[in-house]
């Protein structure tokens, strides 16, 4: 993979998959939101398994899109995995996809549209700009092509929403890839892909926290890996009286890597957060706490929370109840909205392994 300047880190452990109907004022279900950062490169991972084929590709060759010609449709007959981000004014964006297996043939496209526009293929009628890259049909003089594909978008006086698609030829339905977004310039600090608060420790969650676009009446599922986290030496925050997350007697259940996610809890709603390891023999733990909408304190540097809940492997069986490898916590809000921080961890030595995190908001 190419060297990336100002690498921000692994931002998302996998593509977001949403079950339920999408909100009218946001991207439809199945679009993974990525927070781009001015003058930095954000790296996310995804899998073709999370997408699906697109039978109608006529949108791409229409004159109002001009994304790729119909003669190249065969390069996009595999699954399409969709991502979204923001392109600020006075900035240029380089978007690169690289398959984990360099023998895999991937294609990429990206288009910019207005900040109130959330249309996705194949029902997008027009775009400000659309670019695509795919495997060349024949060599180009003085140039070579590897497994990576890169497109460039730019903005002058206006910001834009950006939709990114990763695909491949017919049969390209499985395989992992890395998607990097390098943002050069930008009139102001970038915002979350849904139009939220600017990123960064002062005005948003730190860069190692993955945002999940939870919404009422939906269940959102994201995949993550313990490899993307780090151990937390100080766990005293969890047992202090202003947090009451889990007792110090249970600290050993949280000695492994901690992987962080964030979500928003609307007023008059409840949230069920569940983690399930891909390998059911793996022992994972979970905690989640609620703080004010202007609070982005991340453990262990958090003094108090509205509430904190945790679940971990029981020390002994509980009468009439059984426990498998899944862990669930519940949070609820009455009249006020809240920021939610979610941590996934495990006992000492839990530093590797894939898991699914689902968030159901009622």
Image (cartoon, helix red, strand yellow):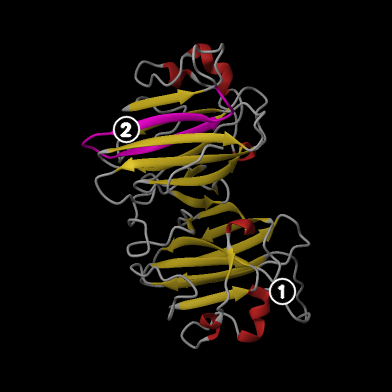
> x, y (%) of residue 142?
49, 15
Mark 2 Cα-neighbour bin, 10 Å: few <14, some 14–19, many ≥20: some
Residue placed most toward the observer, 358 or 284: 284
Name the residue located 64 percent from the left edge and 31 percent from the top edge. Answer: 102
Q: Residue furthest front?
A: 142
Quadrant for residue 324, please give it.
bottom right
Mark-to-mark CA distance, 1 and 2:
49 Å
Provide the secondary structure element on which disc 1 rests. Answer: loop
Is-magenta flag for residue 316?
no
Instruction: Tell me: 22 left or right of 250.
Output: left
> x, y (%) of residue 223?
60, 52
Provide the secondary structure element on which disc 2 rests. Answer: strand
Q: Residue furthest bottom?
A: 241
Label ID, residue 166: none
Question: Most prominent secondary structure in the magenta stretch?
Answer: strand
**Which circle's residue, 1 or 2, is located before the other in the chain?**
2
In the picture shown, does residue 289 fall above or below 304? above
From which residue to which does the magenta span run?
Answer: 145-166
Q: Contact (CB < 8 A) between labels 1 and 2? A: no
Can you see residue 230?
A: yes
Which residue was labeled with disc 2?
154
Residue placed most toward the observer, 110 or 289: 110
Foreground: disc 1 or disc 2: 2
Name the residue located 44 percent from the left edge and 21 percent from the top edge. Answer: 60
In the picture shown, does residue 193 fall above or below 346? above
User: Quick one: quadrant of the N terminus?
Assistant: top right
Is-magenta flag for residue 148?
yes
Which residue was labeled with disc 1?
313
């Amino acid at each position: 993979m190419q060297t990336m300047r100002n690498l921000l880190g692994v931002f998302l452990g996998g593509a977001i998959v949403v079950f339920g109907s999408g909100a009218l004022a946001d991207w439809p279900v199945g679009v993974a939101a990525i927070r781009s950062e001015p003058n930095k490169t954000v790296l996310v991972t995804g899998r073709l398994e999370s997408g699906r084929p697109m039978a109608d590709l006529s949108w791409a060759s229409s004159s109002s899109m001009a994304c790729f010609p119909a003669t190249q449709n065969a390069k996009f007959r595999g699954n399409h995995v969709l991502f979204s981000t923001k392109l600020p004014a006075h900035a240029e964006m380089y978007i690169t996809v690289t398959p984990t297996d360099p023998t895999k043939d991937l294609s990429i496209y990206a288009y910019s549209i207005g900040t109130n526009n959330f249309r996705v293929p194949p029902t997008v009628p027009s775009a400000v700009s659309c670019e695509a890259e795919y495997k060349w049909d024949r060599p180009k003089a003085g140039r070579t092509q590897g497994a990576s594909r890169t497109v460039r978008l730019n903005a002058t006086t206006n910001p834009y929403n950006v939709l990114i698609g990763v695909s491949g030829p017919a049969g390209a339905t499985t395989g992992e890839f890395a998607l990097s977004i390098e943002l050069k310039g930008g009139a102001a600090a970038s915002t979350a892909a849904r139009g939220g608060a600017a990123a960064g420790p002062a005005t948003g969650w730190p860069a190692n926290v993955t945002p999940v676009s939870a919404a009422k009446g939906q269940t959102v599922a994201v995949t993550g890996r313990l490899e993307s986290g780090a151990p937390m030496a100080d766990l005293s925050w969890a047992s202090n009286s202003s947090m009451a997350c889990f007792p110090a007697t249970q600290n050993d259940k949280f000695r492994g890597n901690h992987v962080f996610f964030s979500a928003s809890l609307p007023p008059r709603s409840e949230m069920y957060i569940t983690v399930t390891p891909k390998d059911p023999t793996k022992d994972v733990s979970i905690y989640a706490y609620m703080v004010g909408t202007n609070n982005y304190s991340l453990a262990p540097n958090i003094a108090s929370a509205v509430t904190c809940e945790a679940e971990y492997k029981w020390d002994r069986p509980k009468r009439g109840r059984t426990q498998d490898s899944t862990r669930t916590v519940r949070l609820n809000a009455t009249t006020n909205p809240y920021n939610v921080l979610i941590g996934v961890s495990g006992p000492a030595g839990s530093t590797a392994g894939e898991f699914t995190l689902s968030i159901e908001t009622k």
